[in-house]
Amino acid sequence: MQREILHIDCNKFYASVECYLHPELRDKPVAVGGSEKSRHGIILTKNEIASKYNLTVGEPLWKARQKCPNLIIIPPNFPVYIDFSKRVRKIFEDYTDLIEPFGLDEAWLDVTGDWNKSAIEISEEIRKRVKKEIGITVSIGVSFNKVFAKLGSDYKKPDAITVISEENYRDIVWKLPCSDLLMIGRATAKKLNNYGIYTIGDIANSDEKFMKSILGKNGLTLRRFALGQDTSPVHHMDFERSIKSIGNSTTTPRDLVNNNDVKIVFTVLADSVSRRMRSNNLKGTTLSISVRNSNLVTSTRQCAMPCPTNISRELVHYAMALFSANYSWDNPIRSVGLSVTDFEFDEALQFDFSGSVQKREKLEKLETVVDKLKDRYGDCCVQKGTVLCDKNLQYFNHQANNSTFNH
C-alpha cells in the first residue's frame, strides 16, 4: 500500500495569529519582530501584505522600514502562538494519531489506510476547518513520503493544497532549486552550485559516488530524497525524541569589549543551559561556543570536557578558556552562544582520594537548590557575583533569547 503523507504549514503563523486577534491590522503590512532596544530587531515573520515589499525573515527592522515605511511591527507573544499551535493540532488528531510536529507551525500527518476518505479529501477538510475554527490558513502538501509532502506545502501558498505523486514529481520537484530540498542550507547549496548542481533534478541525476565525495553520507541521503526514496516514518504524536544538545545564545544589550563582559554573558547563559540539563537528568561532555562580532562575522569553537557535567561554573570555565584561546579582539562582540552536547544520564559520582568528585557533588547539589528557588521566585532571585558587575548586561532575558533543545 502506498503511503499517504501530509505536510501542513500554517501560513505566516505569528503574523496570521496577530492579525486574527487584531482585525484592524488585516489590511495593513504587519511584521512580528524582536526588540530593537535590546538589539533583537529582526523580522520573525510577516503577513501577506508585507511580503509584497520583499521583506525577508531575519531582516533588520530598520532595513524593513526603508522598504515599507508604514510597516506595523508587533513584539512576539509566544504563549499565544503555542496555544494556537495546540488548537490546530487538536484538529489533526481527529484524523490520525501519527502526527509529527516540525516546529510550532508545521507538522507531518500519516493518513495511510483511511478507507472512508482519501488524503486529498482529508486535506481539504483540515484546510477548511483550520480557517473556520482557528481563523488562520494552512498550506498542505500531499505525497507518498515526508520530503515531497514538505515540498508540496511550500509549493503553493497561502491556503492551498499541492499533490506530489509518483507520476508527477519529476515535473514538479526536479525543477525546483536544490536549496528547497530538506536538509540543504545555504552553505550546502553554495557548495552544490559550485559543482554545477542547481536544481533538485540535478541532484537526482548526479552520480552516487560523486555526491558522496563532496558531501559524504549526507550526499547519498540528499540523492535519495531527490529520487523520492525517503522512507522515514511519521512518528506517533506521543513520540519523544532524545535530546542531542541544549544551548542558549543572545544578542547583547551593548557590544562586549573585553573578557569580563564576555564572562558575564557566558555566566548567565551557562546558568540557563545547566539548569535545563539538570531538569532533564543529563550531563554533557562537549561544550561549544559561538561568537558574532560587530561586523556580523560568526565563529564557533568546541572542546571536550574531562568528565560529564551539568555544573554552570564548569561550563563558564571551559567557555572562557575556548574564547581566550581563539578570539583576538579585533572587533567588539555583538552576540555569543553556548551549548552542550554528547549527553550521558546523570549518575552517582564515584569517590576519589583527591576529594575533587566530592567537591563537584556539593556544587551540583547547591545549583539544584538554586534551581528550585528560581522556579519559585523567578530567574533573577539568586545570581552569581560575576553578573553584578555591569547593570546593562545583568538583566537581559536569557530564557527568551534563542534557548534551544536540539533533537
Image (cartoon, grey):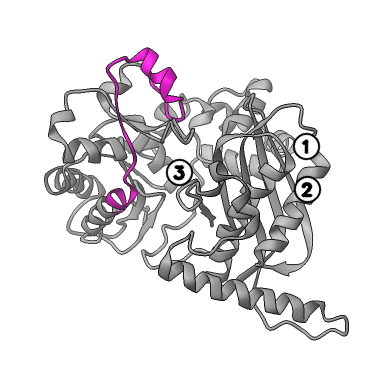
Q: Helix, strand or loop at disc 3?
A: helix
Callout 3 crowding tier (Cα within 10 Å): few <14, some 14–19, many ≥20:
many
Q: Secondary structure at mark 1?
A: loop
What is the CA distance from the residue labelled 2 to the residue labelled 1? 9 Å
The quarter of the rendered structure image containing the C terminus is: bottom right
Does the residue at mark 3 contact the one at mark 2 (Cβ under 8 Å)?
no
Q: How many marks?
A: 3
Magenta stretch containing residue 78, yes or no? yes
Q: Amino acid at mark 3?
A: Val
Magenta segment: 54-82
Q: Residues within 10 Å of mark 2 (few under 14, many from 20)?
A: some
Q: Quadrant of residue 44?
A: top left
Report the residue marked by disc 1.
327
Q: Could you tell which of marks 2 and 1 lies nearer the N-terminus?
A: 2
Magenta includes 297?
A: no
Q: Which label sits on residue 322? A: 2
Q: Position of residue 260 (x, y in %)?
A: 71, 45
Task: Count neighbours of disc 1 (C-alpha within 10 A) and say few if under 14, some if 14 to 19, many if 20 or more.
Answer: few
The three-letter code of the residue at mark 2 reads Leu
Task: Decide which of tag 3 and tag 1 comes sooner along the chain.
Answer: 3
SS category of the residue bearing label 2: helix
**In the rendered image, which residue does mark 3 sit on?**
147
The answer to whether residue 116 is visible is: yes
Nearer to us in this view, 112 or 185: 185
Q: Is residue 62 left or right of residue 188?
A: left
Q: Quadrant of residue 335?
A: top right
